Image (tube, helix red, strand yellow):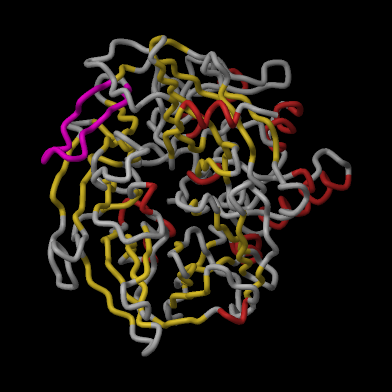
Amino acid sequence: WIRTHTHNWNTGWVGFYGLCNPKSKPNPKEAGCTKENPHPTQNLRFSDKYGWVGSGWTGGSVCGCVCTPLPPCLDGAYIRIGPNPQYFPRGPYHLFDGDGMLHALTISRARPPTLCSRYVRTHKYLTERAAGGPLIPNVFSAFNRFPAGAARAALTAVRIALRQFNPAKGIGLANTNLAFFAGRLFALWEADLPYAIRLTESGDVETIGRHDFDGKLGVSMTAHPKVDHRTGETFAFRYGRAPPFLTYFRFDADGGKKPDVPISSLSRPPFLHDFAITEKYALFVETQIGMDVWRSVFRGGSPLRSDPNKVSRIGVIPRYAADGSEMRWFHVAGFNPVHVLNAWDEEDGHRVGMLVPNVTSVDRALERFDLTHAQVEKVRVDLDTGMVYRVPVSTRNVEFGSVNPCYVGRKNRFVYAGIGDPTPKISGVVKLDVGDEMAGWTRRESAVACRMFGPGCFGGEPFFVAKDPGSSEADEDDGYLVTYVHNEINGESRFLVMDTQSPELEIVAAVRLPRRVPYGFHGLFVRESDLRRASGP
């Protein structure tokens, strides 16, 4: 997947060669960023739909027609985050390395929907904006070969010594995920602290700054924390290149961070992007993928490496563990999920269940996303015998899935996921019934509803919004799926609302957006009451 800036195909980045007139020879100085003009003109863009949208496209804009009235439960904002480089790449570029940009659609009964696209004003973003060009090397594509990679590392050290930037203030991109907990809305990237953000009454997006929870979170945090909506607690972790390679921690309902639980039972740096919680446990998956930054510097390529001789394993630790020695590991071959959909405790109290999109070709996942295939598997770990049972519940190539947020850590029946065509482009969404009544523990296709976006149309991760979030009597699937969809044929982007209980995930409302929203990573819907809480100091 790592592509140079000369790459030009529909599922990759194009770099600054993707001008409106592809036949003309590009002039990087005219095309892009100078110190006097740090923001390129809007008539230049990546021709690929993941690409740069122009940092001038930022202010709130009233959206076009709404096909039908939006459901009353959609009173708040749908926000999606993704990579969008502030400056055109000067060399090889990887999708993960773009600066974080938020695309927030504010929905209110009092006024028309408003779309605002803003960069997260990270330390990296502000430092490079002031310098008029890139200063901080990208993690996935900066160290592309030796000796260039080593020279770039040395140059970075010199810039730090000259105080051109201060890594202690963060080198993160804040481009991966969003989470609302502790009364705040956060933009997340797993190698840095969270960035607190807020939406103004006009629909604009503001960055408050890095948040260290009163100095108790000093290094970094996963981009996929888990919020237990029943207790208000949030669970998280961090991983790194130095022992302990994994640290588990949690926050109470008021946002108070509890002590770290270092886990020393990992022998080398892992790649742990996601995890899961149940009412009793936290579950981690150590896959065949690991981190090797120095190899990236001296040999080139991504810092992520797969080890075909390594056997994956599932780690289970008590939810309120006080010591890392309480972690238990269970080996399971060929198990390489990047994301975890959900987990739960079985009724007998001796087993835990888990749902994951398992990547069946891990070597390809690191270099060619478009060649990967992920199938949703139902996993059961017997804590007494150590046996791990797995069964695929769908053969479709699906990723970027979600469940009803109120069922996080509880046994759920339904999963909503994007259909890769190819991954990471999403050509439609599917609803899976993974309950015991439907899928059980036998091989069976569990798709019960599907919506394809149509020729040339691609979207992102579907997010579930309950029709009546305060009702304890509501069905698990009584709600809507929301996402952005872009039509590559006519250039139009829309916000879609789909009925999750209809057999074809019927589109019940659509909002035409005033500009293209590039494909991104994860998103969420934040209700108006929570937006007001997050707007405080």
Viewed as shown, does residue 444 lie left or right of 380? left
Considering every residue shown, the one lying at the far bottom of the view is: 385
Viewed as shown, does residue 309 lie left or right of 483? right
Residue 366 point in image, percent of width and height: 43, 59
Res. 284 visible in picture? no
Q: Residue at x 58, y 25 (%)?
A: 28
The image quarter containing residue 364 is bottom left
Closer to the camera in the image, 399 or 146: 399
Residue 276 point in image, percent of width and height: 45, 62
The image quarter containing residue 434 is bottom left
Q: Residue at x 48, y 81 (%)?
A: 329
The image quarter containing residue 129 is top right
Res. 454 visible in picture? yes
Viewed as shown, does residue 371 lie left or right of 325? left
Closer to the camera in the image, 416 or 25: 416
Q: Is residue 506 magenta?
A: yes
Look at the image and give the residue range highlighted in magenta: 493-510
Give the quarter of the figure containing the C terminus. top right
Residue 391 sits above or below residue 528 on the image: below
Residue 515 point in image, percent of width and height: 40, 17
